[in-house]
Image (spheres, rainbow, N blue to C red):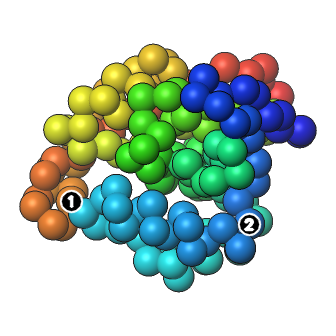
Amino acid sequence: MTLQAVPDERGGARLVRPMQFTDLETVAAIERRTFTLPWSPAVFTGQLARETGIELVCEVGRRIAGYVVADMFVDVWHLMNIAVDEPYRRRHIAAELLEAYFAITELRGHRGHTLEVRVSNTPGTELYRSFGFIATGVRPGYYSDDREDALIMWKDWEGESA
């Protein structure tokens, strides 16, 4: 699959591409600025080394603005991590990352997609709903920093059965 650059409304071009090991310092910095429980660089390195995963970054004018990390567990894609750096938020970068993720996953047979999101993360929940995810349950006390619950969301596979 070829990912293409598209113009950004604020100048420069956007490019969604596979994450590389050379991106990890920037990705880890975005992670630290975004989350109260950030993944360590070692977690990103381990995920990037897995053959089953999908790791994408979105560049805006050659700067990494966001990323998405997902992996297949048995026959379900698990959207594990998505973040957009503060200066690039509200510019549809997360949506572009999800579109690229779905374009890749829909080429491979599976049952569907799942994720967990903080119950307080209304923008994230709304984004996932716009892509067809539905809430299917709650994981009480899921986040160890403040014991906040996680909303479990699910999206069925839209591809053809084997």
Which residue matches tag 2? 20
Question: Between marks 2 and 1, how big is the CA–CA gap?
Answer: 28 Å
Quarter occupied by residue 89? top left
Residue type (three-letter) at the residue carrying disc 1 = Tyr
Which residue matches tag 1? 143
* Mark 2 residue element: loop
Q: Image check: 152 left or right of 83? A: left
- Few, some or many residues within 10 Å of mark 1 (<14, 14–19, 20+): some
Q: Earlier in the sequence, mark 2 or mark 1?
A: 2
Q: Quadrant of the C terminus?
A: top right
* Mark 1 residue element: loop
- Name the residue located 66 percent from the left edge and 20 percent from the top edge: 158
Q: Image check: 82 left or right of 111? A: left
Residue type (three-letter) at the residue carrying disc 2 = Gln
Q: x, y percentage for residue 77?
A: 59, 45
Q: x, y percentage for residue 65?
A: 55, 48
44 over 2 or under it: above or below: below
Quarter occupied by residue 52? bottom right
- Name the residue located 52 percent from the left edge and 35 percent from the top edge: 94
